[in-house]
Amino acid sequence: MKQSEKEAVKKIIESEIEALTAEIENIQKSLEPIKKDCSLDSIDHKMLKQEQNINIQRYEVAKIRLNKLRSSYVNIERDTYGICKECEEDISIERLKLIPESIYCVRCMNELGL
Ligand SMILES: [Zn+2]
């Protein structure tokens, strides 16, 4: 991987981390416990609960991705970054720009069923 490519991917990781951090903060706000509200009937309450469950899922997904991005950011200067863990071929720069936390190339990812 060329240094200029690493710099480009690094910038992408930085902005993704920023966006995810903001998203996580937003979700966190909506995760406050649902207050008992007498004006809500049980159906409304159910819908709020459902909405909260979706938010909890989004929150988990965002947190996992944030951790992966952070470790990619740390690892990017290492020679192993951008190399597929399975076949040890280079992962394409296009893929890394889209998904900087990739540790497999597209072929291996498909073969592994990930
Ligand atoms: Zn591979």
Image: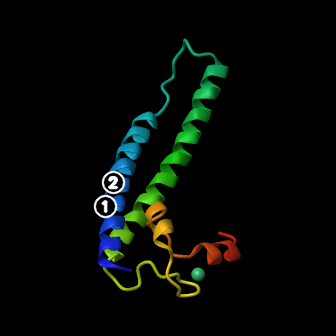
| Front in this rendered view, residue 74 or 4 | 4
Residue 45 occupies quadrant: top right
- Answer left or right for 58 relative to 8: right
Q: The N terminus appears in which quarter of the rendering? A: bottom left
Relative image position of residue 18 (x, y in whole percent): 32, 51
Q: In which quarter of the image is the C terminus?
A: bottom right
Q: Do the residues labelled 1 and 2 touch (CB within 8 Å)?
A: yes
Residue found at x 39% / y 36%:
29
* Residue 42 picture location, percent across and down: 65, 20
Q: In this view, does 48 lie above or below 25?
A: above
CB at disc 1 and ligand 1 closer than 8 Å: no
Amino acid type of the residue tagged 2 in the rendering = Ser
Q: In this view, does 30 lie to the left or right of 14?
A: right
Mark 1: secondary structure: helix
Which residue position holds label 1? Answer: 11
Label 1, label 2: how far apart the Cα atoms are? 6 Å
Tell me if mark 1 has few (under 14), some (14-19) or many (20+) residues whose alpha carbon lies within 10 angstroms of its own: some
Residue 38 at x, y = what percent? 54, 14
Amino acid carrying label 1: it is: Lys
Color scheme of the displayed model: rainbow
34, 73: nearer the viewer: 73
- The residue positioned farthest toward the top in the image shown: 39
Query: What residue appears at the point 55 percent right and 76 percent down from the top-left corner?
Result: 104
Where on the picture, by quarter, is residue 27?
top left
At a point 52% along the width and 54% down the height, the residue shown is 61
Residue 15 circle label: 2
Give the quadrant of ligand 1: bottom right
Find residue 112 and report its image quarter.
bottom right
